Structure formats: structure tokens, C-alpha cells
Amino acid sequence: GERQPLMVLEYSQSMNSGGHELPLFPKLGNRMKRARARHKPCALKELEVSVSELGLGYESDETVLFRYCSGTCETAVRNYDLSLKNMRLKKKIKKEKVRARPCCRPLAYDDDVSFLDTYNRYYTVNELSAKECGCV
């Protein structure tokens, strides 16, 4: 779910002796939902996670920014993809695992990430976070 921003309203007696007027916020809810298309294009997203949560076998409470690629690649279908699809339909390619559609994947990776684990050992991990995403 989406986190709603918390609104902190402070009242000061001296400034406003009359009735407290609350600002009116236009309802963005419905408009936002409609604008959010079913197919989100391939884009770079980020999460703040602990090193332990990465699941690479390191025990550390240090947090890192994990950037990843997410979204669809409908517009990037190439002749290769169309031909591959047809070869599969015509049963010329049967058993192999082939992908007849582009995939949202990193085109480049961020700098190496360094951290200390819970035993004060220093590690550097490369190609951990995406820097740029594209339809491959």
C-alpha cells in the first residue's frame, strides 16, 4: 500500500483567536489512479535495505540503497522477437528456453558497495545495484 504523508497541524492561540480554518486539499486520489497506466514502462526503482536482507550471505545491519529495474517493454519489440515468436509457432524451435520479448534489465551497474559485517570484517560487493535500465 501507499503511505499517506502525515499532516501535522499546529494551533497557536495568539495568532488566531477566531475559528481554525483548515486548508482544503483537492482530492487527488481518483485522478492519480486513472493516470497510473496498467503497463508501467521499464524504469529504475530503489529500496533502502539492510545488507543482510540482500540475501548474499553477509550478516550486517548496515543499510544500502538497492536500485533495480522494473516495468514492461512492450514498445521495444524488435524483428528478432517477432521472428523468434514465429519460429516457435512453426515448431522450428521447440525445447530451448528462449524469450521472445524484451526484458527490463540493468544496462549498467552502480559503483561497488562496501560495508562492515557484524564481525567488523570489511567487504566490497560489485554489480549489486542497477544504474541504468533498459529493454534488453
Image (spheres, rainbow, N blue to C red):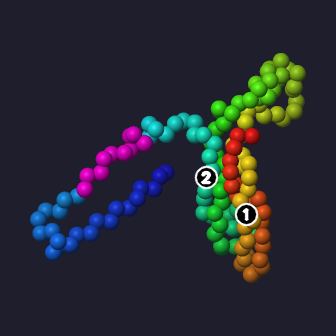
Mark 1 touches mark 2? (CB < 8 Å): no
Q: Residue furthest bottom?
A: 120
Say whether residue 64 is magenta.
Answer: no
Main secondary structure type of the part rendered in magenta: loop
Left or right for 83, reference 27: right
Q: Where is residue 81? Give x, y as percent.
A: 77, 29
Residue at 11% x, 65% y is: 18
Closer to us: mark 1 or mark 2? Answer: 1
Q: Residues within 10 Å of mark 1 (few under 14, many from 20)?
A: few
Farthest residue toward the top? 90
Other-residue count near label 2 (Cα within 10 Å), few / some / many at <14 / 14–19 / ≥20:
some
Residue ID at (73%, 36%): 102
Which residues lie in the magenta part? 23-32
CA gap, disc 1 to disc 2?
A: 16 Å
In this rendering, the answer to whether 95 lies above or below 33 is above
**Eyeballing the image, is 95 above or below 131?**
above
Quadrant in the picture for the C terminus: top right
Q: Position of residue 52 (x, y in %)?
A: 70, 67
Q: How many marks?
A: 2
Element carrying mark 1: loop
Quarter of the figure with residue 109: bottom right
Q: Name which residue lies at 61% across and 56% down.
A: 46
Q: Which residue is mark 2?
A: 45
Residue 97 position in % (x across, y down): 84, 35
Q: Which residue is mark 1?
A: 111
1 or 2: tag closer to the N-terminus: 2
Q: Nearer the viewer, residue 4 or 57?
A: 4
Residue 108, above or below 42: below
Rendered image: mark on residue 65: none
Question: In this orientation, does residue 99 appear?
Answer: yes
